[in-house]
Amino acid sequence: MGREGEVVSELIPAFERQNPGIRVQVQQIPWSAAHEKLLTAYVGEATPDIAMLGNTWVPEFVALDALEPLDARVARSSDVVRSDYFPGIWSTNVVEGITYAVPWYVDTRVLFYRTDLLAKAGYDRMPSTWAEWRTAMVRLKSGMSARQYPLLIPITEWPPPVILGLQAGSTLLRDNGTYGAFSQPQFKKAFDFYIGLYRDGLAPALSGSEISNLYQEFERGNIAMYISGPWQIGEFTNRLPKSLQDKWMTAPLPGIDGPGVSLAGGASLSLFRRSTNKEQAWKLMEYLSRPEIQLQFYKLTGDLPARRSTWRDSSLAGNRHTRAFREQLDRVVPTPLVPEWEQIATKVFEHGEQAIRGRKSVEKALAALDSDVDGILKKRRWLMEKQKAGSR
């Protein structure tokens, strides 16, 4: 999908030279159409041999019985070495104890921040706990105008409240992923912290579409911190003026009592059950998983490699802006491995917006969120009950 679809074509000729007789046809599709196209291919019994999947999609395709289990192949492989992957990332591809995909590139969220503004507030580094982080934001705000903010978290983004919930120990869902757990104390504690950022003027109550130009606002000092992913390294490098290049940095996310967890994101490579070329497709998956190919892929795309050994290369180890991501990747956790997660994530920010704008109390917003999530998971509960009855 996307830019990766262009770049992978550049990696194929070397694979075909190493494997005479195997020919690879790459089909590039936009991210916006990918999910629907793959589901349509499944229904029409026309799935590809191998596909790149956003790792939150893996449980959905597993539920359809569309993917081939990979544990036996991984165990025999010298190219796909499980212990060389970030554990939290690998676990996004394991559903009910079975591995269905291999991480291809990784993604997580960290803080991008203005080092000069933080220094002006009395800090030579980003705080590592919620309490210290909030104090730093209060100090930053005291030196800002009414339309300047220490932190930008667009209210239409679901990852920040979910990350805070995970840091507070929330499971997000309960009873084997069949009910929402958003009203429970752990998520409520995180949600209170999250809503308090807007209530106390530390973050603006704006949607993504209401922010005219993130990079200009960052340059002007109207925003001091922003939670985002690795794609922003290139954007900040290219879009911020030369005079500001030594005044921004990345940092791992603070947690309740110390460095906190973040989301395990990225894309993985999956083998479809209906493939008639499984052995050849697995060879391609092994090839794309090799550390040297991962490094080449990073240099072509900027996508962070899933193999820990690849991070020893100077292009990553010597990059001051990727260091926070390397540190954060040791502390990442997956979202619940249920096919309905994409729908649930949308409900998180929808109800969060209601609380941020004061239309609902925290308690009522979380109760409504749980109610909606329970409705989304109704079919899952029915299927699990049916499976349970059938096993008796």
Image: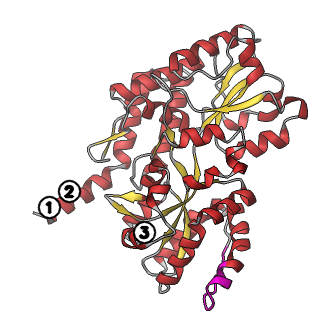
Quarter the C terminus occupies: bottom left
Q: Evaluate if marks 1 and 2 touch, with contact meaning CB atoms under 8 Å apart.
A: yes
The residue under label 2 is: 385
Dot 3 or dot 1, earlier in sequence: 3
Q: CA distance from mark 3 to mark 1?
A: 34 Å
- The percent coordinates of residue 249 (x first, y second) are 72, 31
Q: Evaluate if marks 3 and 1 touch, with contact meaning CB atoms under 8 Å apart.
A: no
Dot 3 falls on a residue whose secondary structure is: helix
Q: Residue furthest top?
A: 142
What residue is drawn where x is 43% and y is 35%?
166
What residue is drawn where x is 47% and y is 82%?
278
- Three-letter code, disc 2: Glu
> Which of the numbered marks, if any, corresponds to residue 389?
1
Q: Which residues are magenta?
A: 15-27
- The percent coordinates of residue 362 (x first, y second) are 44, 22
> Is residue 229 depicted above or below 272 in this figure?
above
Quarter of the rendering containing residue 211:
top right
- The percent coordinates of residue 154 (x first, y second) are 64, 32
The residue under label 3 is: 74
Nearer to us of marks 3 and 1 is 3
- Three-letter code, disc 3: Val
What residue is drawn where x is 70% and y is 47%?
231
Dot 2 falls on a residue whose secondary structure is: helix
- Three-letter code, disc 1: Ala
Quarter of the rendering containing residue 206:
top right
